[in-house]
Amino acid sequence: MASKIVVDTSVLIKWIKTRDEELRSEALGLLGVIQREPLDVTVPALLLYELGNLLLRKTRLDSGGIAAAIEHVLHLPITVENPEPGVLRRSARLGRELKLTFYDASFLALAEELDCVFVTADRRLFNAARGLPRVRHLSKTGSVG
């Protein structure tokens, strides 16, 4: 059985956006590991909206290009999870405890629910969540399985 991992939008955007992205080589290295090993990437459905927003605001892509980029992501080896009541409750708890947005907490909650590693390139999120088990910053992923 493959190991699971949750990545957030700050990691996934680096798989498709080529300019002005720090840690892009680390993100592509992680994607290579994901494609070579039995490693299931799971993300909350929220990621697709965050990704669309980033592409809209941080690129020069037209609407067709944004739609194509999101469609490309849907063909990557990832599983998109719809919100479940238990994960939503965890998101609220983690958001309050760690002073995070509900959006950021939803990635942590999903990783907690799946009992797996969570990887982010967002330093603020990482610093808030670093006390939780299996939280990794993209710059220090090493072994993620």
Image (spheres, helix red, strand yellow):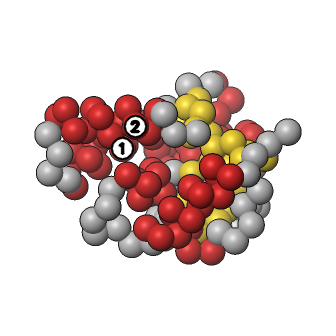
- Identify the residue at horizontal 40%, vertical 37% (top origin): 72
Give how far apart the Cα atoms at labels 2 and 1 are: 12 Å
User: In the depicted view, which residue is nearer to us: 103 or 116?
Assistant: 116
- Quarter of the N terminus within the rendering: top right
In the image, is 129 to the left or to the right of 65? right
- Identify the residue at horizontal 19%, vertical 32% (top origin): 64
Q: Given contact means CB atoms under 8 Å apart, are the residues at marks 2 and 1 in contact?
A: no
User: In the depicted view, which residue is nearer to us: 134 or 76?
Assistant: 76
Q: Quadrant of residue 127?
A: bottom right
Label 2, residues with CA under 10 Å away: few <14, some 14-19, many ≥20: few
State the mark number for residue 121: none
The residue that mark 2 highlights is: 72
Residue 102 appears anywhere in the view = yes
Q: State which mark lies toward you, 2 or 1.
A: 2
Residue extending furthest right? 1
The residue that mark 1 highlights is: 51
At label 1, the amino acid type is Leu
- Identify the residue at horizontal 63%, vertical 43% (top origin): 41
At label 2, the amino acid type is His
Q: Is residue 136 above or below residue 116?
A: below
- Image coordinates of residue 47 in percent, x first then y, are 45, 40
- Image coordinates of residue 43 in percent, x first then y, are 56, 40
Describe the element under mark 2 as helix, strand or loop. helix
Q: Quadrant of residue 137?
A: bottom right
Q: Is residue 25 above or below residue 39?
A: below
- Quarter of the C terminus within the rendering: bottom right
Describe the element under mark 1 as helix, strand or loop. helix
In the image, is 18 to the left or to the right of 121? left
